[in-house]
Amino acid sequence: MTDRGERMKVELDDSLKERIKLHLDLMDKHALNIIRAAARIEIILSEAVKSKFVNEIGVQKVVGDSLARLIQLSFALGVIKQKTYESLLNFKKIRNRMAHDPEPDLKVSDLLSMLLFLGNDAERVVQERGSYLAEWHKVSLEVLVEHIEREANA
């Protein structure tokens, strides 16, 4: 029986250590890509929302620093459509999880949930632009940002 103060030592072989390191590095890259995409989305939506204002006031004065409020206002003003709104709510949840979870992880279902506006074609579109699973994350974010840019500027 071990002492409560003693920790169980687990020996990891070099292969497993390398896979864990690669996974952590990949999650760091995903987190950075999500932060960059969030910044781009905020710029796109802020500019589109501001163009709908009748009186001169900064978007930040209306929504503060809240991406959720900006998404809601964008939908309310017709800047984005229902499926894009739902996609952005899913994106926001993923962004928050990546920012606040000490061990965040992404699944293919997370990536596809950001692309609800594509309907059943989401997986096909991502596969066409990203040949392997590790690319799917970046491709999904690119597709999301491109779609928002087109829809907000329509």
Image (spheres, rainbow, N blue to C red):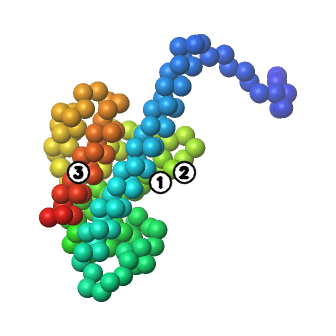
Q: Earlier in the sequence, mark 2 or mark 3?
A: 2
The nearer-to-camera label among 3 and 1 is: 3
- Which residue lies under the disc numbered 3? 146
Percent of width and height locating residue 36:
40, 49
Task: Please determine whether, in this image, residue 111 is positioned above or below residue 135.
Answer: below
Which SS class for mark 3?
helix
Which SS class for mark 2?
helix
Q: CA distance from mark 3 to mark 1?
A: 21 Å
94 or 40: nearer the eye? 40
Label 2 CA crowd tier, 10 Å (few <14, some 14–19, many 20+): few
If the image is split into quadrants, where does the N terminus sit?
Answer: top right
Task: Please determine whether, in this image, residue 152 is positioned above or below residue 110.
Answer: below
If the image is split into quadrants, where does the C terminus sit?
Answer: bottom left
> Left or right: where does residue 45 sit relative to residue 32?
left
- Which residue lies under the disc numbered 1? 96
Type of the residue with mark 3: Glu
- Which residue lies under the disc numbered 2? 100
CB atoms of marks 2 and 1 within 8 Å:
yes
At a point 32% along the width and 32% down the height, the residue shown is: 135
Type of the residue with mark 2: His
Label 3 CA crowd tier, 10 Å (few <14, some 14–19, many 20+): some
Badge number at residue 88: none
Q: Earlier in the sequence, mark 3 or mark 1?
A: 1
Label 1 CA crowd tier, 10 Å (few <14, some 14–19, many 20+): some
Q: CA distance from mark 2 to mark 3?
A: 26 Å
Q: CA distance from mark 2 to mark 1?
A: 6 Å
Type of the residue with mark 1: Asn
At a point 26% along the width and 50% down the height, the residue shown is: 144
Farthest bottom residue? Answer: 55
Task: Please determine whether, in this image, residue 146 is positioned above or below residue 45.
Answer: above
